[in-house]
Amino acid sequence: QVQLVESGGGLVQAGGSLRLSCIASGRSFYMNAMGWFRQAPGKEREFIAAITWSGGDSYSPDFVKGRFTISRDNAKNTVYLQMNSLKPEDTAVYYCAAVRGPIARMDLRDYDYWGQGTQVTVSS
């Protein structure tokens, strides 16, 4: 069982930055690929970034490439999402998720564990 707790959300002006953190419980964190998703009001949850168990490979959609970076520190059981050049359309609840396996996934249906989410609001 893996429990995930996100933090770092908040209110920021357009063009600003935030770093989200997700701390995982459980001894096998290093064996889990991790991902970040977001959900805006009235919209479906969408993929933001994923990283393999080792941190050696990461993936993200084009609309965040160059702005958002996923990373992890297995010694701290923590995965991060660095968000730069934020836009009002980035406003959403951001969720951390874990896969029972080492391979990064982009489909939310492949994820086994989810955090409660952290609100990110970007003002114009």
Image (cartoon, grey):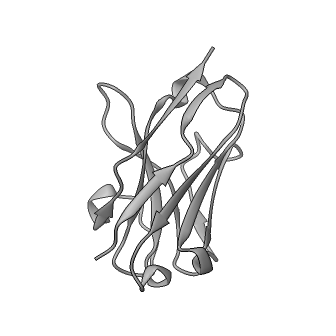
Quarter-wise, where is residue 45 in the image?
top left
Residue 124 at what x, y percent from top left? 63, 14
Question: For the N terminus, which image quadrant?
Answer: bottom left
41 left or right of 10? left
From what the image shows, is residue 11 above or below residue 68? above
Tell me residue 54's x, y (percent): 58, 81
Q: Is residue 82 above or below residue 121?
A: below
- Give the residue drawn at x 41%, y 66%: 105
Residue furthest out toward the top = 124
Q: Is residue 102 left or right of residue 72?
A: left
**Residue 85 position within the rendered picture, expressed as x and y whole percent measured from the top left:** 71, 33
Depth check: give the residue in front, 83 or 20.
20
Residue at 38% in and 30% down: 40
27, 52: nearer the viewer:
27
Residue lying at 53% horizontally and 25% vertically, measured from the top left? 89
Q: Answer above or below: position of 45 versus 101.
A: above
Residue 106 pos. (x, y %): 42, 59
The quadrant holding residue 74 is bottom right
Q: Residue at x 59, y 58 (%)?
A: 80
Q: How many marks?
A: 0
Which residue is at the front of the view, 10 or 110? 10
Q: Is residue 80 left or right of residue 92?
A: right
